[in-house]
Image (spheres, rainbow, N blue to C red):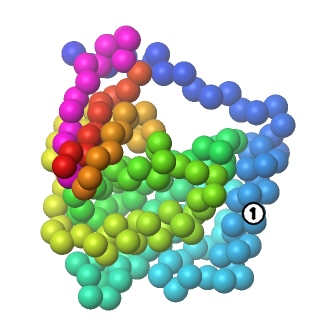
Amino acid sequence: MEADFSLFKRKQPSKSSTSKGLSKVAALRIQSEAHEWLMNPPSEFEYTPTDDLRRWIVQIFGAPGTLYADEMFNVQFDFTDDYPMEAPEVIFLSPVPLHPHIYSNGHICLDILYDKWSPALSVSSVSFSLLSMLSSCTKKERPPGNDLYVRRCFGGRSPKEANWHFHDDKVLLAVKPCDQSSSHLLTCVYVG
């Protein structure tokens, strides 16, 4: 039995949107962050500005002496009108790194992207968190339940539609029934 995702509510655009479809607050914050990156570019990342403020592609370079040394990964940041009050959607693009907290579809099990988000965080701080997550990895492997999670995310579902629970550094995937009363695809749970 497949889930009926037509029940998911989509956010309506703000009436105070700019011509690019972002709220003034979100557009100003994103422009400010882009300016900061251009003025003080971190050596671990590369970002090339485009005309589309809603989407950034940041290249993350694996740190020397880690499992990901000499590797480069593209991370996509998608912003909404509610940024910075709401986290951007952040996913790895193909090729996706093999990591216990990164699913093969690019979704990332990292608390600051969901319930631990703060408006004080930025693209830069999230990028450093992702680099730290990669750098501390001791074994290249997919999270438990990767195949099931990816199957449940058919049609390009957002990682924000999953119900993420975080505890310690181990991942356990618990699938919730996908019925009309469920508002999430599944639950990803960290267990100690």
Asked which quadrant contains residue 153, the reply is top left
Q: Amino acid at mark 1?
A: Gln
Q: In the rendered structure, which segment of residues is drawn in magenta?
A: 170-182
Can you give x and y, in whole percent of width and height, for residue 60 in the image? 44, 74
Q: Considering depth in this image, is 176 or 18 the residue closer to the camera?
A: 176
48 or 132: nearer the viewer: 132
Residue under label 1: 31
Vertical side of 6 occupied by 89: above or below: below
Q: Residue at x 41, y 66 (%)?
A: 130
Residue 57 appears at what percent x and percent y? 53, 64
Q: Which image quadrant for residue 151?
A: top left
Q: Residue furthest top?
A: 180
Q: Height in image: 171 above or below 49?
A: above
User: Looking at the picture, how far across and down is residue 94, in whole percent?
Assistant: 35, 61
141 relative to 7, above or below: below
Residue sitting at x 38%, y 53%: 110
In the picture, which quadrant includes the N terminus?
top left
Considering the numbered disc 1 on the image, is that residue within a helix, a strand or a loop?
helix
Assign the magenta stretch its main secondary structure: loop
The image shows a total of numbered marks equal to 1
Would residue 105 be visible to someone looking at this image? no
In the rendered view, tell whether residue 16 sits above or below residue 179: below
Residue 33 at x, y percent in the picture: 69, 66
Within the magenta stretch, is there residue 142?
no
